[in-house]
Image (spheres, rainbow, N blue to C red):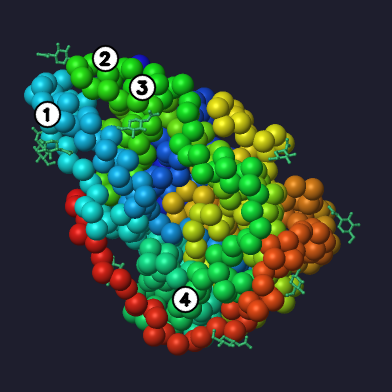
Amino acid sequence: MQQIRTGIVCLSLVSAATAITGSSVFSESLISQQVFDGENFLKYDGVRGPYVDRVSYGISRDPPAQCTVGQVIMVKRHGERYPASDEGPSIEQALNKVNSTLARSGNYTGDLAFLKNWTYFVPSDCYEAETYTGPYAGLTDAYNHGKDYRSRYGHLWDGKSILPMFTADFQRVIETAQEFGEGFFGNDTYSIKAALNIISESDSQGADSLTPTCHRQDDNAQNICNDLPYHLPQLDVAADRLNSQYHGLNLNWTNVYNLMLMSAYELNTRPTSDWINVFTIDEWVSFAHIWNTNFYYCSGPGNEYMRAVGSLYVNATLSLLREGPSSNSLFFNFAHDSNITPIITALGIATPSENLTVDQVAFGTRWNIHDIVPMGGRLTIERLNCADSALAPAGPFVRLVLNEAVVPLQGCHNGPGYSCPLDNYTSFVQGLPNFVTECEVPSSDPQYLNFWWNYTTSTESNFVKGTRCNGLA
Ligand SMILES: *[C@@H]1O[C@H](CO)[C@@H](O)[C@H](O)[C@H]1NC(C)=O
Ligand SMILES: *[C@@H]1O[C@H](CO)[C@@H](O)[C@H](O)[C@H]1NC(C)=O
Ligand SMILES: *[C@@H]1O[C@H](CO)[C@@H](O)[C@H](O)[C@H]1NC(C)=O
Ligand SMILES: *[C@@H]1O[C@H](CO)[C@@H](O)[C@H](O)[C@H]1NC(C)=O
Ligand SMILES: *[C@@H]1O[C@H](CO)[C@@H](O)[C@H](O)[C@H]1NC(C)=O
Ligand SMILES: *[C@@H]1O[C@H](CO)[C@@H](O)[C@H](O)[C@H]1NC(C)=O
Ligand SMILES: *[C@@H]1O[C@H](CO)[C@@H](O)[C@H](O)[C@H]1NC(C)=O
Ligand SMILES: *[C@@H]1O[C@H](CO)[C@@H](O)[C@H](O)[C@H]1NC(C)=O
Ligand SMILES: *[C@@H]1O[C@H](CO)[C@@H](O)[C@H](O)[C@H]1NC(C)=O
C-alpha cells in the first residue's frame, strides 16, 4: 500500500521557516532528480492541518535587484486550530464506532493497532480554539510568522510610531494577531508600539469590514456548498479495507471522511498522527478534492458573488497602494479562510478554466485550496519602487505574494520580478464588480472600507484574551 511520507512534513516545516532567505539563482549543489511535492501530506489535508508554503513559479521571493519594497498589506488566516464545533459530533461518532469494535474484541492488531495506546486530542472545550501544543501549534506559527516578517519588512516601521494592526473580532483570529504582533515587535515592544484594532464581524459593518457578507446568494453554488462531504468512491475503498479487518466494524464513507478530517487536525496539536497512514495517498487525493470543491462553491470562483465580495478588499488596498508609503506602510490584517478566498477570486490568480466537478477529482486545477488558504495562510501585497531597467521605466509596481510564493497577476506581469505596474494594476482593479451594489449592502450600513484610515492608536486591546482551552499534549 502506498502511503504518504510523513517524514516530508518535517522538511516542509523547515522550508516554511526559512522561506525568507529564498535566493534568486539556482543552487550550485548537486541538483536533485526527485520531486517530493506530490508526497507532502500537507498538500492533501483539506487545509485542516498545518500551514504549508505555496509551490512557487520559480520567481524569487525577494524583491528584484532594481527594486525596494516600500509598502506591504497582508491578510492572514488564523493559525492552526482544533476542529470546528459542528465537526465534533461526527468525528466522535466515527471514532466511537472504531474504538468500541476494537475494545469489544480486544484485538489490537492490523491497521489500527496503535489505538491500544492512543487518546483523542480534543477536549470538549477546545473545539474552534487555536492550538498551542506541538510543533505546528497555531500560536507558535503566528509568532514565528511575525518574527519572519520583522526581518523581511522591519525597515518599513520607523521604530517609534505606533503601528495599528487589524483583526476580525473572533477569538482565534484575535489571538493570531496578538502572537504575530509579539513576534514582529518583540514581546515588550508589542505592548507599547502595536495598537490592535478589533473590527466587528457583524453584518451591520457593511463595507467597513474584514469579513464582508453578501446579501445576495448564488443558490446553485450554495446547495453544493451545503452538501459537504461529497461522496467519492476512494472513501468506500478505505471503509472496505478497515471493515474487512475488524469483525463487526461497519464504517461507511462518511465515517471514513470524518476519521480523515480528524487525522489532519491531530497534527495541529501533536508532532505526528498515526491515523495519516491508515489511509492511502489515493484516498487523501480524494479528501483534498472534497475541500477544493467546497471552497470553490462556498467562497470561491464557483459562486457568482465572490468576485464582488473580494473586490471590497482589493479596491480598498488599491487606495492604500496609490497613496503609497507614509509614516505607516505596514498593514497587517487577520481574518478567516472564507474571507481570503473571495479576494483570491477577485484577483483571478487561481480561477480555473472549468468548474470543479463534485464527484470526480479535478486533476491539475488551478483551484488548489492548499496553495491558497492553509491554516495561517497569507496574501501579502507588496508595493515596489523600481529603478529604470530593460523591463520597464522607473516607478511603482505591485506584487502579490501568496503563502510566500510570488503569483503574477494574469495579463500583467511585465514589471521587474514579474510585477505589475501600479497604473496597470489600477485599471485591473477598477474593472472589478462593486461590492456595495452587487451585494446590496443596505444604505444604512457603511459603504466604504474605512478602518485603515480611521483607527485607534490605543494599546488597550493588545492583550484581550479569552480563556484558553484545556488542551492535551
Ligand atoms: C485479529 O485481527 C486480525 C486482523 O486485524 C485478524 O487477522 C485476526 O484473526 C484477529 N484475531 C482474533 C483472535 O480475532
Ligand atoms: C503509550 O503512550 C505513552 C505516552 O505517549 C508512552 O509513554 C508509552 O510508552 C506508550 N506505551 C506503549 C505500550 O506504546
Ligand atoms: C476507547 O474505548 C476504551 C474502552 O471503552 C476507552 O478506555 C478509551 O478511552 C477509548 N479511546 C478513545 C480514543 O476513544
Ligand atoms: C514572547 O512571547 C511568546 C509568545 O507568547 C513566548 O512564547 C515567548 O516565550 C516570549 N518570550 C519572552 C522573552 O518573553
Ligand atoms: C454513516 O454512518 C453514520 C453513523 O455512524 C450515519 O450517521 C451516516 O448517515 C452514515 N452515512 C451514510 C452515507 O450512510
Ligand atoms: C460554472 O457554473 C456556473 C453555474 O453554476 C455557470 O454559470 C458557469 O458558466 C460555469 N462556468 C464554466 C467555466 O463552465
Ligand atoms: C499598461 O498600461 C499602459 C497605458 O496605461 C498600456 O499601454 C499597456 O498596454 C498596459 N500594459 C498591460 C500589461 O496591461
Ligand atoms: C473603490 O474605492 C473607491 C475609493 O474608496 C470608491 O470611490 C469606489 O467606488 C470603489 N470601487 C469599487 C468597485 O468598489
Ligand atoms: C472612526 O471610527 C470610530 C470608531 O470605530 C467611529 O465611531 C467613527 O464614526 C469613525 N469616524 C469616521 C469619520 O468614519
**In this figure, which residue is indicated by the disc labeled 4?**
198
Q: Residue 428: x percent and y percent?
A: 79, 58
Q: What residue type is labelled 3?
A: Ala
Q: Earlier in the sequence, mark 2 or mark 1?
A: 1
Q: Is the C-beta of the residue carrying label 1 under 8 Å from the nearest atom of ligand 3?
A: yes
**Residue 194, quarter of picture:** bottom left
**Proximity of marks 3 and 1: CB atoms separated by less than 8 Å:** no
> Is label 2 or label 4 in front?
2
Q: Distance between the residues labelled 3 and 1?
A: 21 Å
Between 160 and 1, the residue placed more toward the observer is 1
**In this figure, which residue is indicated by the disc labeled 3?**
238
Helix, strand, or loop for circle 3?
Answer: helix
**Residue 105, quarter of picture:** top left
Helix, strand, or loop for circle 4?
Answer: strand
Q: Which mark is residue 65?
A: none
Q: Distance between the residues labelled 2 and 3?
A: 10 Å
Density class for disc 4 (Cα within 10 Å; few <14, some 14-19, many ≥20) is many
